[in-house]
Amino acid sequence: MPYYGKISLACSLCRTRKIKCDQLRPSCSQCLRISATCTGYRDPKSTVFRHYSYITEKRKPLPESFESADSDIEMALKSVTKSHRLDGSLSISTNDLVTSLFYGYFTVGGSPTGHLFTSWLPKNIPNTDNDASLAAFRATGYALLFAITKSQDQLAMARQKYSKALYLTRQALESPDTSQTCWIVRIILLLSLFETFACTSYASLLMVHQHFAGAAALLRTQDLYNKENPLSKDELQVFLLLRRRLVATSLMRKMPIATAVIRWSEAVKKIMTPDELWSSELWDGIAQLANLQAKLATNQPANYANYIQPLEQQDRHLSTWANRLPQSWRYEIRSRQFKDEDYPTYYYKYIDYNVALDWTHYRVARCIIHHTILKFSQTADVTIPSSILSNQIVNSERIIQSLCDDICATVPYFLRQTDQSSSSKPGIDALDLVWPLHMTVNMDCAPLSQRLWAQGKLQEIGETMGISLASQLAAVLKPAWLQVNANR
């Protein structure tokens, strides 16, 4: 083979300008300096036979059908949603397939209202290449495709689209027009999903929360919810989704909730439906718990009463919420038609997906409360009678075990594994199980078999359902406690 010189791995713009490219991610410094879209970098393996690409293309037979041309993508589509066989003569771009995959993934079956996330997704996707929402949409779709097929080419394409989405979003943020605020927040929420699907390291977990915090900061800066005109239904759905995601991740990371978010929650209650009001009451309580967790993490009181009593007050508040719920929010206990190893023989059936989601986060919040009480009671130097302390420990352990049983009994509903005839595959349903299962694995007082089962479900969600975040959490949870408990 003749030698044609050293291969340049620079981006296309730096190669055209014949300048040095530092190949930083997601965009090189030269492209950032001139506010240009960095197209990504060459793969050394793909350039080995670059001079023979024309001959190879001439010899390569045309695909006989859609199936032979895009087998990886079609396999991903089959794993998420059912699709009709397409005519092989149709010319379908990868972008169109990514769009179909995305919407199939975020379709929630068996629920009257679907998922809150899908309530504001655009019915028609813009077709202009310089649209930030289209770039974010495609970035998330390619990241999902990578998570399912494990194709590094799809990951590279996803990061390229992600870089373009960040660039276009930054341009939109510089605009003084505040009417586009909700549109920008939707883009940021899409970018947070990119981090979830393209998660290849624990550092990606931090980026998810940073996206939520950035969206909240944008709303606070532009003071969107202080305007005199009432919010539209779409704007309300954007806020409700953002609050749910922000509060959930803040609780897990022991981060405080911005005061503006709590103030907005009160301001928008007058336009909520009755079901939205019940949900809002729960998330207001979880937000208070997140702030309390953050306060205790930075300034732990030495007095036992000052530490435990605020947590018990939050627990009573959440329990009262659950006891006051209307009959439409109650769930049915049903037996399963088949049994897996260490799998619950029953499951909870809910009237609506969002109702099931709120019940699950209610249980996670109470698990965190009693787990915190247990840790303090077992390690703190307290002066209260040992009998009272012992009763507190026993009571918290009993409540945690009951809540973990409830979380596990909800898993079949989320994963659509209620019986052998369940043929549909979970999409965003599985995404909402990641943190509850993570919490179950971390509960020391839960049975070992239950914790192992929960960790196995995390691995299943990551490996077969394309949620890389679950795989990363399962890998983090593997080591110490499993070995210690196995040797008992």
Image (tube, grey):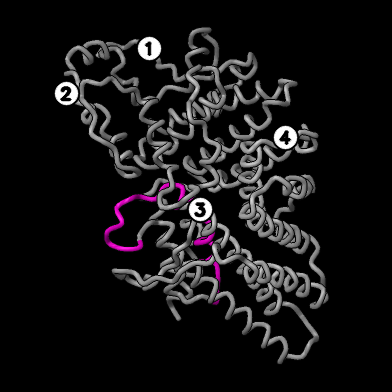
Within 10 Å of disc 4 (Cα), the crowding (few <14, some 14-19, many 20+) is: some
Q: Residue at x 62, y 68 (%)?
A: 322
Looking at the image, is mark 3 or mark 4 earlier in the sequence? Answer: 4
Q: Amino acid at mark 4?
A: Leu
Q: Is residue 287 above or below residue 140?
A: below
Which residue is under mark 3? 432
Task: Look at the numbered discs 1 and 3 and tell me whether their residues touch, using CB distance below 8 Å.
Answer: no
Q: Please tell me which residue is depicted at 26% across the width and 35% down the height of the picture.
A: 84
Secondary structure at badge 4 equals helix
Q: Which residue is mark 2?
A: 64
Q: Secondary structure at mark 3?
A: loop
Residue 278 belongs to magenta span: no
Comes first in the chain, label 2 or label 4: 2
User: Which image quadrant is residue 100 in?
Assistant: top left
In whole angstroms, how far apart are the C-alphas of marks 1 and 3?
51 Å
Mark 3 → mark 2, Cα distance in angstroms: 40 Å
Label 3 vs 2, first from the N-terminus: 2
Mark 2 or 1: in front is 2
Quadrant in which the N terminus appears: top left
Could you say which is closer to the camera, residue 214 or residue 444? 214
Disc number at residue 204?
none
Residue picked out by circle 4 = 218
Residue position for label 1: 5
Cβ atoms at labels 1 and 4 below 8 Å apart:
no
| Residue type pointed to by label 2 | Glu
Between the residue at mark 2 and the residue at mark 4, the CA separation in whole angstroms equals: 50 Å
Q: Earlier in the sequence, mark 2 or mark 1?
A: 1
71 sits to left or right of 105: left
Residue ID at (48%, 26%): 124
